[in-house]
Image: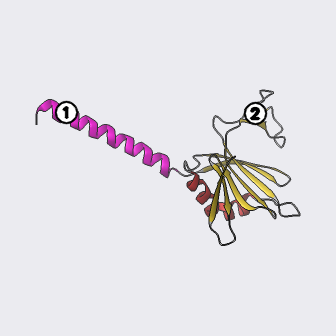
Amino acid sequence: MKFKDKKVLCSSLLIGCALLGYFLWLLLRPTEIIAAHQRRNYSDILVRNFPLTEQGKINWWLKNKKILKNEYDIPKPAKDGFYTVIFWDFGEGYKETDGYDRLCFDDMKTEINCIDKNSLMMVVYSKNTGLYFRLDSGKYYVKENGEMERRKYE
């Protein structure tokens, strides 16, 4: 093997290892809950480092729903049991309203109380539909036997 070929091979391996390390870091970093905002039976949870895959997001909810209930009293169902929990990417943090498309939280008494709308997952429960997860590719309904049924958007 020529010196030039060895150099290319070593460089390729180094770049490959660096990329693999970066992707592992992305997958393994813990989700951070920045804040939780409540309005009646609707909860908004602002997060960083939410799982990248849809199955990862659902698994995160299933693993952490007791912690959310104990620490944030979320979800907070209405009398009929209905609730919605929306996970938002905290992104660049709180900002002032743009008067148009930012999500603002009235429970914060400051002008810097809005975020850019980037929803990551919605968890909804009602007696009619049961529990389902609304994600980019569709809705995942939890059947009575615990299995998931994915329904694409029409």
Magenta segment: does it hold 49?
A: no
Q: Secondary structure at mark 2?
A: strand
Mark 2: amino acid: Arg
Q: Which residue is mark 2?
A: 102
Residue toward you, 49 or 111: 49
Q: For residue 143, which quarter of the picture?
A: bottom right
Q: Seen in the image, is 116 located left or right of residue 30?
A: right
Per the rendering, the mark at residue 104 is none
Residue toward you, 84 or 90: 84
Residue 132 position, x and y percent, is: 70, 58
Q: CA distance from mark 1 to mark 2?
A: 50 Å
Cβ atoms under marks 1 and 2 closer than 8 Å: no
Magenta residues, start to end: 1-29
Q: Which residue is mark 1?
A: 7
Residue found at x 72% / y 63%: 70
Residue toward you, 107 or 8: 8
Residue 146 in the image: above or below residue 94: below
